[in-house]
Amino acid sequence: MIQDEGYGRASNPQEAVNSMEENSSENLDLAFDEDLVIIDIDLQTREEVIKLLSEKFIQKGYVTDKFTEAVLDRERKFPTGLPTVVPIALPHTDAIYCKKSAIAVGILKTPISFKEMGNPDKSLLVKIVFLLALPNPDLQTKWLQRLVEVFKDGEILKKLAGMRTKQEIFEFLNKALFKSKEVS
């Protein structure tokens, strides 16, 4: 379990109190370990990739049995592909299907077509998929914003796409997402 100690830091005391009250039922912990990283995924469709990553959450008890279908349904209606330097996708679904906050990462052997967020008529060849399970809707928004913020830096995604071991990917993402905004 990793805690995001610096994310959402308040700039004044009242903001800090408000932030603590908003997060009292769900802190910023997010389950992420090497077991939630899958490399060299050799599948043909986004549906297959989402099912594979979802299975990790189901095995760990992080989501309900309806999670996978809910993610697939949401991805059809509201695509999550992002046209970053190395295209990524951020599939997720409503909080009611999630029991515990977690992120799974899939590095694809060959890029797979995902529809672009905000432009569903356009397809992107995605290389990296980040599947999110977040039982708190406010936290879901914060983590999506955090991921987009971090991955605006194309160098981070280029490095990530070139990594070859689960441990290397886990340690790199741990630093990028949880420790600081700078990654070497």
Image (spheres, helix red, strand yellow):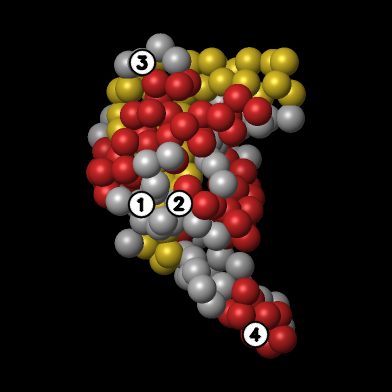
Give residue 43's mark.
Answer: 3
Kindly identify which residue carries mark 2. 98
Q: Amino acid at mark 1?
A: Tyr
Look at the numbered disc 4 and give the secondary structure of its residue.
helix
Residue 5: image x %, image y %? 48, 70
Q: Residues within 10 Å of mark 4 (few under 14, many from 20)?
A: few
Q: Earlier in the sequence, mark 1 or mark 2?
A: 1
Give residue 62's mark.
Answer: 1
Residue in the picture at 62% in, 60% down: 138
Residue in the picture at 59% in, 33% down: 74
Which one is closest to the eye, mark 2 or mark 3? Answer: 2
Q: Are marks 3 and 1 in contact (CB under 8 Å)?
A: no
Vertical placement of 15 versus 36: above or below? below
Q: Earlier in the sequence, mark 1 or mark 4?
A: 4
Q: Amino acid at mark 4?
A: Val
Q: Amino acid at mark 2?
A: Cys
Q: Is residue 179 left or right of residue 122?
A: left
Q: Amino acid at mark 3?
A: Leu
Q: Are marks 1 and 2 in contact (CB under 8 Å)?
A: yes
Disc 4 to disc 3, C-alpha distance: 46 Å
Q: Are marks 4 and 2 in contact (CB under 8 Å)?
A: no
Disc 2 to disc 3, C-alpha distance: 25 Å
Disc 3 to disc 1, C-alpha distance: 24 Å
Disc 1 to disc 4, C-alpha distance: 29 Å
Q: Earlier in the sequence, mark 3 or mark 1?
A: 3
Kindly identify which residue carries mark 4. 17
Residue in the picture at 34% in, 44% down: 57
Vertical placement of 144 versus 85: above or below? below
Which one is closest to the eye, mark 1 or mark 4? Answer: 1
Nearest the eye: 65 or 36:
65
Q: Residues within 10 Å of mark 3 (few under 14, many from 20)?
A: some
